[in-house]
Image (tube, rainbow, N blue to C red):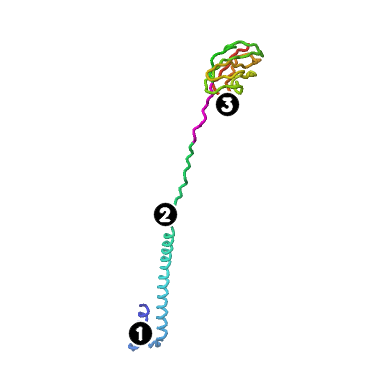
Amino acid sequence: MKAKFIIVSFLTIFLLSACGETVPVSPTPDINAIYTIAAETVVAEMTQTGIVNTSTPKATTTATQAAEIATSVPTSISVTETPVTILVESSPTSQICDNAIWVADVSVQDGTEMSPGQGFEKIWRIKNTGSCIWDVGYQLVYGYGEEMSGQARNLNSIINPEETVEVTVVFTAPLTTGSYQSYWRMRNSAGANFGEFFYVDIVVR
C-alpha cells in the first residue's frame, strides 16, 4: 500500500508541474528511481512481516515439546509388594518335672544368735513335689543374701517324688555383728535350678 501511495504522489506532482505556467519547471522524475524506492519499501514490509511470523514457530515448538514430555510420563506405577514372613514359635515339648518345697527347719531356728566367725550347720527338711527322681546329681545351691561361706552337702540317697529329705549347708558366721540371711534352693543334674527358696536367719553378737 505504501508503494502505491508513493507512485501516485510522484505522478501527481509531475502532472501539476506540467500544467502550471507560473510554477518553475522541475526536473523530470526518474521512473526507475521511483520503482526502486517502491520496491525497497515492499521488501522492508515483507521483512517486518517475516520477523513477526518467525516468532510463531517457537510457540509451536514449545507446545510440541510439552506434548512429547506429557506422553513420556508413565501413566501408572508398578509397586512390588514385599512378602511378609510370619514366625510361629513352637511350643516346648519337654515337661518340667522338677519341683521342691520347704517343709521345716531342722536346726538353727530363725533369729538364732551366733558369735562372730562361729561355724554351724543349717538343716532343712524339703519335699520332692515333682515327677522326677532326685539322684546323686541333684544338689543344694546358693541363691542370694549373705553366702557366709556356705558349703552344701551332697545327697546321700535317691529321693522319689512325694518323698522328703533333709539337706545340709555348713556356714561360718560373719565377723561383723548384725542380722544375716542366706537363701538356697535345689539344682538338678542338668544344672537347672528349681523349687522354692529356703533360708537361714541368724544374729551375730
**SS state under label 3:** loop
* N-terminal label among 2 and 1: 1
Circle 2 residue: 76
Q: Amino acid at mark 3?
A: Ala
Circle 3 residue: 192
Relative horizontal placement of residue 48, taking residue 187 as reference (left or right):
left
Residue 95 within the segment the image draws in magenta: yes
In the depicted structure, whether residue 163 falls above or below residue 40: above
In the depicted structure, whether residue 32 falls above or below residue 155: below
What distance separates the C-alpha of mark 3 from that of mark 2? 61 Å
Closest to the observer: 17 or 80?
Answer: 80
Circle 1 residue: 11
Q: Nearer the viewer, mark 1 or mark 3?
A: 3
* N-terminal label among 1 and 3: 1
- Is label 1 in contact with label 3 (beta carbons under 8 Å)? no
Pick the quarter of the image with the N terminus: bottom left
What distance separates the C-alpha of mark 2 from that of mark 1? 74 Å
Q: Quadrant of residue 110?
A: top right
Q: Nearer the viewer, mark 2 or mark 1?
A: 2
Closest to the observer: 72 or 12?
Answer: 72
* N-terminal label among 3 and 2: 2
Q: Quadrant of residue 72?
A: bottom left
Q: Which residues make up the magenta segment?
A: 89-99
Tell me residue 173's x, y (percent): 64, 15
Residue 113 within the segment the image draws in magenta: no
**SS state under label 2:** loop
Relative horizontal placement of residue 101, taking residue 8 as reference (left or right):
right
Q: Which mark is residue 103?
A: none
Q: Amino acid at mark 1?
A: Leu
Label 3 environment density (alpha carbons within 10 Å; few <14, some 14–19, many ≥20): few
Label 2 environment density (alpha carbons within 10 Å; few <14, some 14–19, many ≥20): few
